[in-house]
Amino acid sequence: MQMKSTGTSRFFLMGKSYKFLLAILSLGIVVSLFPPQSTSGAAGDGSAKQTRRTRRNGTGQTAVDSGDLRLRYKPRKKLTAATQDHVVGSNAQTIEKLLADLNQRIKLPFDIYVVFVDCDSPDAFYEPETHEITLCYQLIDEYYSLFARKIKDKTELDSAVKAAMVSTFFHELGHGLVDAWKIPITGREEDAVDQLSTVVLIEATEDGERMALEGALTFKLYAESEQGEEIYWNEHSLDEQRFFDTICLVYGHDEKKYDYLVKNGTLPEERALVCIEDYARVNRSWRQLLAPYLKVPARPRRKLR
């Protein structure tokens, strides 16, 4: 589960630090799931159709591709004056295209449904019994409320909310993959799929580094709005920890490009010292864990869009 839903909407009171963080995290940021080191080449055709292939996994079992990601799109029941301009999540065709692209890259033993629906509260979660990833419109609305306090430009606001939702989706997809293939995880699964989401954004998603950083900002802003409300027994790490974990991986991916994060104090130097090693380890681990369940392309693929 990506979000810690309380059953009521949060209202966010952020200080001037937000503008500073958004500015420094956006500087110079211009990513096949886990493509090879060279990512050049022609694009795939985007079709959801797939060739059934098998490959041995680490236990000697055959990974049979018998499922797909499928969309269950339920339009909003009611739009309000506050939500009528929320475009993120409103284009079912764009979502279908992303799922079709992913279906060309990953194997599944059963169908996993991606459900956009109205919920009682802001939330996103994977349900193993029904094999459903639920993405609530109310979470999209909450992200708009979170960023709109400081972002006034509509295009920039839509971009930030899209980044947060894409990050959330990959997090929940991580839960789905762990469940589908019984992927071994040591430590907290929530931390592991946080890392997977960040690696997929960086390695396999167009403009994914920016998305990872803006996704990290949601944790920072949640932390600022919930002073004194930390839940230490929760299965998630604290929001501020998730913020630092994410920007550490981004920095570790390209320390020269993101050196400004250390210079301006956003990423403490003591943490930065281990980020390069952390990213290499996390990237290598997830590539190894997912290798039996990734389809081998006939030619290099473009990044996810």
Image (spheres, grey):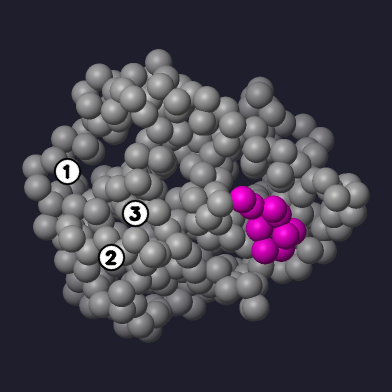
Q: Confirm whether the magenta stretch covers residue 179.
A: yes
Extent of the magenta region: 178-186
User: Is 267 left or right of 206, judged from the image as shown?
Assistant: left
Q: Which residue is mark 2?
A: 142
Residue 204 drawn at (x, y percent) = 58, 38
Marks 3/1: CA distance?
Answer: 18 Å
**Residue in the foreground of this view, choosing between 225 and 123:** 225
- Considering depth in this image, is 13 or 137 the residue closer to the camera? 13
Q: Position of residue 238 (x, y in %)?
A: 34, 54
Which residue is situated farthest in the top direction here? 256
Residue type, label 2: Glu
Q: What residue is pinned by disc 3?
A: 238
Residue 82 visible in the displayed image: yes
- Specify the amino acid type for callout 1: Tyr
Q: Secondary structure at mark 1?
A: helix
Q: Nearer the viewer, mark 2 or mark 3?
A: 3
Q: Earlier in the sequence, mark 2 or mark 1?
A: 1
Sort mark 3 into few (<14), some (14-19) or many (20+) by Cα contacts within 10 Å.
some
User: Between residues 223 and 51, which one lies in front from this camera angle?
Assistant: 223
Q: Position of residue 91 (x, y in %)?
A: 46, 63
* First in sequence: mark 3 vs mark 1: 1
Tell me the mark number nearer the camera, choosing from 3 and 1.
Answer: 3
Q: Is residue 248 above or below residue 37?
A: below
Compute the Cα span from label 2 to label 1. 17 Å
Q: Quadrant of residue 282?
A: top right
Dot 2 or dot 3, earlier in sequence: 2
Density class for disc 1 (Cα within 10 Å; few <14, some 14-19, many ≥20) is some
Q: Which mark is residue 18?
A: 1
Residue count near mark 2 (Cα–Cα under 10 Å), binned few <14, some 14–19, many ≥20: many
Q: Is residue 282 left or right of residue 10?
A: right
Three-letter residue code for mark 3: Leu
